[in-house]
Image (cartoon, helix red, strand yellow):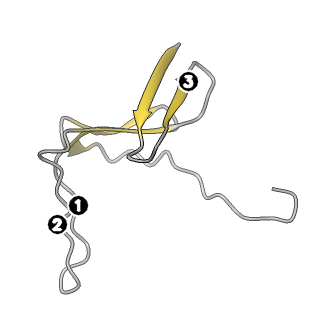
Amino acid sequence: MLRLRLETGFTRSLTLLLMEGYKADVVVFDPQTIRYNATYANPRQYSTGADFVLVNGEISVENGEYTGSRNGKLLLLTKNS
């Protein structure tokens, strides 16, 4: 189990739990180096500065490089959700 405390920039912080069997997307980045490279003229550019990205517990970006992993699932809005 990993307990994370997130400073939201608002008046309070969030506490989250990461445990085996839980589903979560996690991005590990340095706020000093994160950069969004997409522009209106060239919109299909990856961001840089994200060291690790985990989607549903699987590594999608490792050491800043996309692994080719496609672990996400489409979430549909339904009447019962």
The numbered disc on residue 37 is 2
Circles 2 and 1, Cβ within 8 Å, touching? The answer is: yes
Identity of the residue furthest to the top in this view: 1
Residue 76 placement: quadrant: bottom right
Q: Nearer the viewer, residue 12 or 78?
A: 12
Quick one: label 1, few (<14), some, or many (20+) residues within 10 Å? few
Q: Nearer the viewer, mark 1 or mark 3?
A: 3
Q: Helix or strand or loop: what does disc 3 sit on?
A: strand
Residue 16 locus on image (x, y percent): 54, 28
Circles 2 and 3, Cβ within 8 Å, touching? The answer is: no
The numbered disc on residue 17 is 3
Say which label, 2 or 3, has the lower sequence index: 3
Which residue shows up at 19% across the image and 80% down it?
42
Q: Is residue 20 above or below residue 61?
A: above
Q: What amino acid is labelled 1 in the image?
A: Tyr
Q: Nearer the viewer, residue 60 or 18?
A: 18
> Gap between marks 2 and 3, in whole Å?
31 Å
Which residue shows up at 44% across the image and 49% down it?
70
Which residue shows up at 42% across the image and 43% down it?
8
Q: What amino acid is labelled 2 in the image?
A: Asn
Question: In the visual, does 46 lie left or right of 69?
Answer: left
Quick one: label 3, few (<14), some, or many (20+) residues within 10 Å? few
Q: What amino acid is labelled 3 in the image?
A: Leu
Q: Helix or strand or loop: what does disc 1 sit on?
A: loop
Which residue shows up at 16% across the image and 66% down it?
37
Q: Nearer the viewer, mark 2 or mark 1?
A: 2
Question: In the visual, does 64 lie left or right of 15?
Answer: left
Residue 54 locus on image (x, y percent): 40, 37
Label 1 sits on residue: 46
> Gap between marks 2 and 1, in whole Å?
6 Å
Q: Nearer the viewer, residue 15 or 51?
A: 15
